Image (cartoon, rainbow, N blue to C red):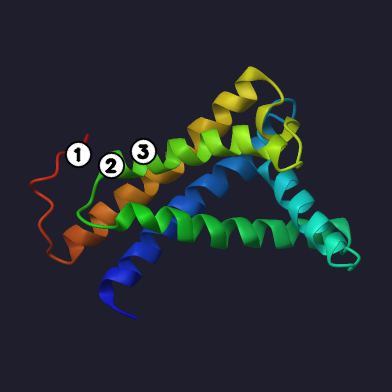
Amino acid sequence: MNSRMTTALLSGLAGAAALNLLHETMRRVRPEDAPRMDTLGRRAIASGMEAAGVDPPPEDRLQAMALGGDVVSNTLYYSLAAMGKPSFARGAALGAAAGVGAVVLSPLLRLGSRPAARTPQTAAMTVAWYLVGGLAAAAAHHGLAHAQGLDTESIPATA
């Protein structure tokens, strides 16, 4: 695997880890209104399996599958933050787009609106946490690029 791909995937993994750490922590700390993207993941996996004529696994195994799927899909998505020169603006845009997408698309995909937008605070947290993931991916990309000796000086920390 080439250096650019490795950097992109490591940056994406940093974003996915930040996002999942926030989700998993806050669903325990604020169970009344924290986003429950794990619930969306479980529903998506179960409905896909049922559509294929396969019985979904027990809840604990479905939870593990959803978490694993979140890490993989978010790693791939946030790796887009590492395309080109390091850019916090790109990471922020990707994160905000993912957050808005989670709030808006969940009900349209028949996964329910409550996990991502149960209350206005839930919807705001959903967008904010995906934004944090995008910024974490951008920060990791900036750090990895700097460690590799690539030009990062022309990129302001707030851009």
- Which mark is on residue 21? none
* Closer to viewer: mark 1 or mark 2: 2
Residue to which mark 2 is pinned: 88
Q: CA distance from mark 1 to mark 2?
A: 7 Å
27 on left or right of 13: right
Q: Quadrant of residue 88?
A: top left
Q: Image point 76% across, 56% down: which residue?
A: 63
Q: Quadrant of residue 133?
A: top left
Task: Please state which of residues 21 and 103 is positioned toward the viewer in this rendering.
Answer: 103
Residue 151 x %, y %: 10, 57
Residue 153 visible to an observer of this rendering: yes
Task: Please state which of residues 100 and 134 is positioned toward the viewer in this rendering.
Answer: 100
- Which mark is on residue 157? 1
Task: Please state which of residues 51 and 103 is positioned toward the viewer in this rendering.
Answer: 51
Q: Quadrant of the C terminus?
A: top left
Residue 32 x %, y %: 75, 26
Residue to which mark 3 is pinned: 92
- Check disc 1 and report its element: helix, strand or loop: loop
99 on left or right of 96: right
> Is there a contact, CB below 8 Å, between mark 1 and mark 2?
yes
